[in-house]
Image (spheres, rainbow, N blue to C red):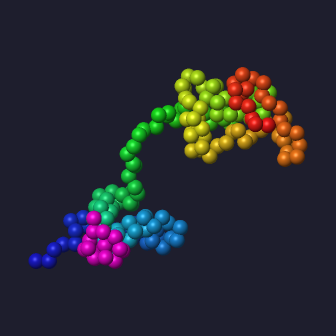
Amino acid sequence: MARAASRDIVVLGPRRKARLEAIVRRSSAPQALVRRARIALLAHQRWPNAQIAAELGCTVNTVRTWRHRFARRGMPGLQDRPRSGRPEGYGPDVRLAIVATATSAPPAGCPARTHAMIAGQLPAAGISVSQVGRILAGLDLAPHRVRDGSTAATTTSSGPRPPRCATSTCARRRAPW
């Protein structure tokens, strides 16, 4: 008796099949997603796992994994599952407070915000200067590169430099100029 292709039977309706074919045709689609879509399309044609693996140049275990996930979860099954790892130390509320502080106007007399200033203005969060820097870097924010309106016009490559900050939170780390 002939062995079945797999216990995970993939049944595709016309809309789902069209979506998978669109993923395969799209040149900007991530290649991992394209491979998974091709596995689902070939599984729908009842190809055995070994034949799909040979056709796509991957292992039988890879085909088995994605065929099973697609059969059980459908289109969302083609996406990567969340990775394990250390949970975030600071939740969205602390991150939002950091962004709000970083994007607000700096105190009077300070030409720009520093990570130390931002950490100093959030004592309840108990966040370190380096963690503020990592969070802002992850969000692609650079508040130290933004000058307030009064000094932006005077800050040119050949013009005078902005005044140093006189407040205690900003005076700890002075700019090299």
Q: Nearer the viewer, residue 135 or 92?
A: 135
Q: Is residue 18 visible?
A: no
User: Residue 73 is drawn in which quadrant?
Assistant: bottom left
Q: Main secondary structure of the magenta part?
A: helix
| Left or right for 167, reference 28 | right
Which residue is drawn at the image coordinates 83% and 32% (left, top)? Answer: 163
| Left or right for 10, reference 153 | left
Name the image quarter holding the C terminus.
top right
Q: Nearer the viewer, residue 19 or 127?
A: 127
User: Residue 24 is drawn in which quadrant?
Assistant: bottom left
Farthest residue in the front direction?
176
**Magenta region, residue range:** 44-61
Q: Nearer the viewer, residue 119 or 33?
A: 119
Which residue is drawn at the image coordinates 46% and 37% (left, top)? Answer: 88
Q: Position of residue 8 (x, y in %)?
A: 24, 64
Q: Does 77 appear above or below 41?
A: above
Q: Does residue 54 belong to the magenta stretch?
A: yes
| Left or right for 96, reference 167 | left
Q: Position of residue 1 (x, y in %)?
A: 10, 77
Q: Position of residue 96 (x, y in %)?
A: 58, 35
Q: Does 30 appear above or below 47?
A: above
Which residue is drawn at the image coordinates 69% and 39% (left, top)? Answer: 143
Total labels: the figure holds: 0
Q: Does residue 2 belong to the magenta stretch?
A: no
Which residue is drawn at the image coordinates 47% and 34% (left, top)? Answer: 89
User: Residue 51 is drawn in which quadrant?
Assistant: bottom left
Farthest residue in the left direction?
1
Q: Position of residue 26 (x, y in %)?
A: 51, 70
Q: Is residue 29 visible?
A: yes
